[in-house]
Image (cartoon, rainbow, N blue to C red):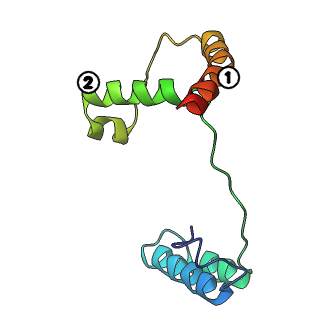
Amino acid sequence: MIRAPNRDTPQKRPDVIRARRDFVLGVMRSRSWITDAQYSEARSHGVAFVNGSIPVALYPFYLRALRAEIVSAVGLRTVLEGGLTIVSEMDPAAQRAARTRGAPRAAAIAVAL
């Protein structure tokens, strides 16, 4: 992962990207996470860059409230460590209906303000 993706893009600064990649590979080799052969093989390739995307949450307001409630109940550390199974009473059909019916009203309220 690029440390400063807006500044150090492969198109603008390929030398910085290559140096960072080589540094990470060196750390991986020094910790025996990869072999010398894997290190050499990885360094022999150019730096590949794949544009990612931020996933869109289907029900952002509901999920934000649910996360806040869970953090309040079990603590942030427990949530961040993972391994929880959360069962909620959310009804996806009701959420879709609220979103489609609520959006025009929200826009009208914003205009009125």
Q: Position of residue 95 (x, y in %)?
A: 60, 16
Q: Is residue 86 above or below residue 50?
A: above
Quadrant of residue 52 within the rendered picture: bottom right
Label 2 crowd bin: few (<14), some (14–19), many (20+), radius 10 Å: few
Which residue is identified by label 2?
A: 73
Q: What residue is at 67 percent from the left and 15 percent from the top?
A: 101
Q: Secondary structure at mark 2?
A: helix
Distance from Cα at disc 2 to Cα at disc 1:
34 Å
Q: Position of residue 44 (x, y in %)?
A: 72, 84
Q: Which residue type carries mark 1?
A: Pro
Q: Secondary structure at mark 1?
A: helix
Label 1 crowd bin: few (<14), some (14–19), many (20+), radius 10 Å: few
Quadrant of residue 67 within the rendered picture: top left
Quarter of the rendering occupied by the N terminus: bottom right
Asked whether 40 or 62 is in front, the reply is 62
- The answer to whether the residue labelled 2 contacts the one labelled 1, judged by CB atoms less than 8 Å apart, is no
Count of all numbered marks drawn on residues in the image: 2
Quadrant of residue 110 within the rendered picture: top right
Q: What residue is at 51 percent from the left and 82 percent from the top?
A: 23
Residue 86 visible in the snapshot:
yes
Q: Is residue 113 above or below residue 46?
A: above
Q: What residue is at 61 percent from the left and 32 percent from the top?
A: 111
Residue 84 visible in the snapshot:
no
Q: Which residue type carries mark 2?
A: Ala
Asked whether 1 or 69 is in front, the reply is 69
Q: What residue is at 59 percent from the left and 34 percent from the top?
A: 57
* Label drawn at residue 80: none
Asked whether 91 or 76 is in front, the reply is 91
Which residue is identified by label 1?
A: 104
Q: Nearer the viewer, mark 2 or mark 1?
A: 1
Q: Can you name the residue that lies furthest to the bottom here?
A: 15
Q: Position of residue 112 (x, y in %)?
A: 57, 28
